[in-house]
Every structure is written in C-alpha cells, then in structure tokens.
Image (cartoon, rainbow, N blue to C red):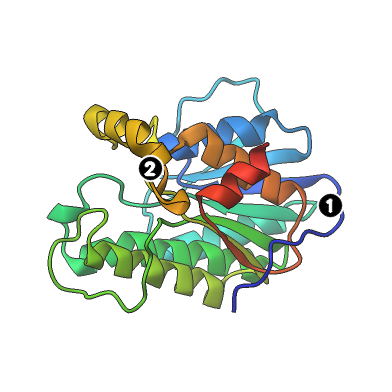
C-alpha cells in the first residue's frame, strides 16, 4: 500500500546505484546525482562503457549479459564491497519502439530486469530506498491486448507490472515517479513536445509534460531525504520536490 509523501530527517553520506543511465532521463539523472556531494561513489549498471571522463566519481558496473540472474549477482557483489549504505535509482524502460515488441519482450526488459535489479538491492542489505521511474496511467487492470505503444492499455499494464515487481522484491521504501510526456527525451517527437507544451495549461495536472532534468531533480531530491514510506509521484508532486 502506497503511503504519504512525508519525509524523515536527512541521511548521511551514501553511495548511489543507477540502472538505465544511458537513456535521456538516465543521463540527466546521472548528471544530477554526480553533482551532489552527498553521493559517492556513483555506480552505473550498464551493458557497455558510457565513455565517461576519467576524473569522475562514477564507477561503471559492466554487465554484458544483462539478464536477471547476472544483474542480481553483479549488484549484490558491487554493493557488498561498499563501506557505506546506498540508494537505488532505476529509469530503465524500453523507450521508443514498444509498439514493435511482443508483450513478452516488453516484460523481459521493463519488468524482469527491474525486478532483478531491485532484488539485488534488497539482498545486498545496503539499500533501503529505491527511486523508480514508471509512467503516468500505469494500471495493473489494463488490457494486455492491442498495441504496446506508449499511452495504450498494454503499455500501461506492463508499467504497472514493473511497479508491482519492484515493490514486491525491492527495498523497504519505493518511490514511484510517473511522468507523462517527457520533454528533452530523444524518444519524444518534436511535434509531440511542442503540442504538449502548448496545451499544458489546459491539461489535467498529472498529465502535463515534464523535462528530463526535472524528473532527475525530483528523484534526487526525494533520495536526499529518505521517505518514511512508499509513495507515487505524478507531475504536481515532482514539481513540488524541485521548487
């Protein structure tokens, strides 16, 4: 059961571990986490090197075979080597092209890989809080038939399944972020971004567009003050975190 947005006192210095850092939101998130003096080291779980500069506190955990079993083992091993506790972040998702995937293919990434990552966080004993990006409209009762494109029922179903999986297998506290149209994403067509921005004042609050940098700032702001319990953050709550 998701609870209130109340926060406890600030946590001391901690590490951060990120899944999905190579995407548009992931890149913004990595920049935001890296800028914070509160997080060190910053571990990114990736298939291949990101080509980051050498003078960085970011450590790449390269997992070429990005399967559930290898993610669990790799995450547990990496976190067990740390002398401090950590906070988890996941912005992993298919992005564009979900309409071309079967339901099983979509689940294999959005649900199975996120579930494995969060299971690794929990099994390490080093992580109490996960900030997880889903999508507005996530609905566990949505139909599984039809197109898997963003905004359609099957897409909403998979996102809700991913939320359920990370809550069931992950750390004690899971903060779920549900953006609508993401401005600045390589997967959001320019015309869609322009239309969403123009119509924003007439759009219900939770469906208004939000920038990649704002999502990143909201997730980091939430992680800097560990919530007392799990909660869902739509556009209004995300914007409130970055004011």
Image coordinates for residue 63, horizontal then vertical, percent? 44, 49
* Few, some or many residues within 10 Å of mark 2 (<14, 14–19, 20+): few
In the rendered structure, the answer to whether residue 242 lies left or right of residue 64 reads: right
Q: Is mark 2 on a helix, strand or loop?
A: helix
Say whether residue 88 is left or right of residue 213. Answer: right
Residue name at image x 15 percent, y 73 percent = 145
Q: Residue 92 carries which label?
A: none
Q: Which quarter of the image is occupied by the N terminus?
A: bottom right
Q: Which of 196/86 is in front?
A: 196
Element type where label 1 sits in the image: loop
In the rendered structure, the answer to whether residue 232 lies left or right of residue 108 reads right
Q: Return the x and y of residue 185 as percentages of the image width and height.
A: 36, 34
* Front residue of this view, candidates 223 and 236: 236
The residue lying at 42 percent from left, 38 percent from top is: 201
Instruction: Work out whether 193 lies above or below 131.
Output: above
Marking on residue 11: 1
The residue pinned by badge 2 equals 202
Q: In this view, does 13 lie above or below 5?
A: above
Q: Can residue 48 be seen in the rendering of this structure?
A: no
Q: Which of 118 and 201 is in front in this view?
A: 201
């Amino acid at each position: 059961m998701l609870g209130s947005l109340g926060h406890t006192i600030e946590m001391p210095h901690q590490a951060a571990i990120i899944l999905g850092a190579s995407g548009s939101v992931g890149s913004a998130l990595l920049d935001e986490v890296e800028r914070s003096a509160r997080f060190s080291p910053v571990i990114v779980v990736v298939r291949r090197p990101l080509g980051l500069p050498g003078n960085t506190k970011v450590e790449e955990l390269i997992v070429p075979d990005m399967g559930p079993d290898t993610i669990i083992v790799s995450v547990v091993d990496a976190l067990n080597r740390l002398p401090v506790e950590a906070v988890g972040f996941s912005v992993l998702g298919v992005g564009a092209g979900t309409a071309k995937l079967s339901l099983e293919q979509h689940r294999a990434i959005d649900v199975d890989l996120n579930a494995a990552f969060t299971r690794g966080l929990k099994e390490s004993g080093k992580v109490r809080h996960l900030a997880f990006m889903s999508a507005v409209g996530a609905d566990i009762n949505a139909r599984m038939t039809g197109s898997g494109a963003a905004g359609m029922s099957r897409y909403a179903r998979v996102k809700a399944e991913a939320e359920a999986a990370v809550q069931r297998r992950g750390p004690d506290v899971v903060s779920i972020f549900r953006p609508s149209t993401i401005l600045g994403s390589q997967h959001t067509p320019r015309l869609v971004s322009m239309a969403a921005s123009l119509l924003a004042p007439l759009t219900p609050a939770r469906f208004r567009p939000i920038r990649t940098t704002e999502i990143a700032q909201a997730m980091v702001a939430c992680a800097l003050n560990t919530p007392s319990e799990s909660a869902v953050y739509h556009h209004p709550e995300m914007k409130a975190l970055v004011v």
